[in-house]
Image (cartoon, grey):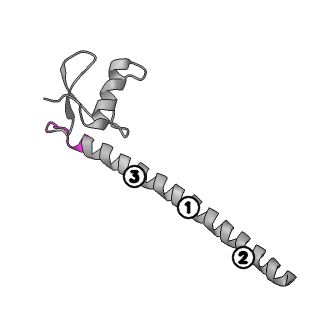
Amino acid sequence: MADRRRLERFLRSKLREAGEQYEELRTSTDAQLDEAREAYRVARNARELPSDEEGRAKIVCRRYAERRAATLDDEYRPACYEAGHPDCEGCAEDVRAGRIETW
């Protein structure tokens, strides 16, 4: 009888461990999948921007309210981007979201 209880406790603990490991793995892969989807969405939005013959994005600068052809860096920020400036931050966010004004 004691051996049976020990076996039950052992099996329950092992099944609980397996369930916890599965949950950790599932949570991790869900987060990775969400990150990949977001990266794809941002890249697609940036690729859909109209561009000139040199491959620069044709955007309207929010800071100076003028048309610009700007290259985008790895984080899809225009070359004229200035960190910390509210208009530049908004512009970079709009590029990533696909709602930037273009010409």
Mark 2 or mark 3, earlier in chain: 2
Does the magenta portion include 51? Answer: yes
Residue range (magenta): 46-53
Residue placed most toward the observer, 85 or 55: 85
Label 3 to label 1: alpha-carbon separation: 16 Å
Residue at the spot of label 3: 36
In the displayed structure image, the side of residue 31 where residue 4 appears, left or right: right
Q: Is residue 73 above or below residue 40?
A: above
Residues marked 2 and 1 touching at CB (< 8 Å)? no
Residues marked 3 and 1 touching at CB (< 8 Å)? no
Residue placed most toward the observer, 24 or 15: 15
In the displayed structure image, the side of residue 87 where residue 64 appears, left or right: left
Mark 2 or mark 1, earlier in chain: 2
Q: Residue at x 24, y 22 (%)?
A: 61
Quadrant of the rendered image containing residue 53: top left
Mark 3 or mark 1, earlier in chain: 1
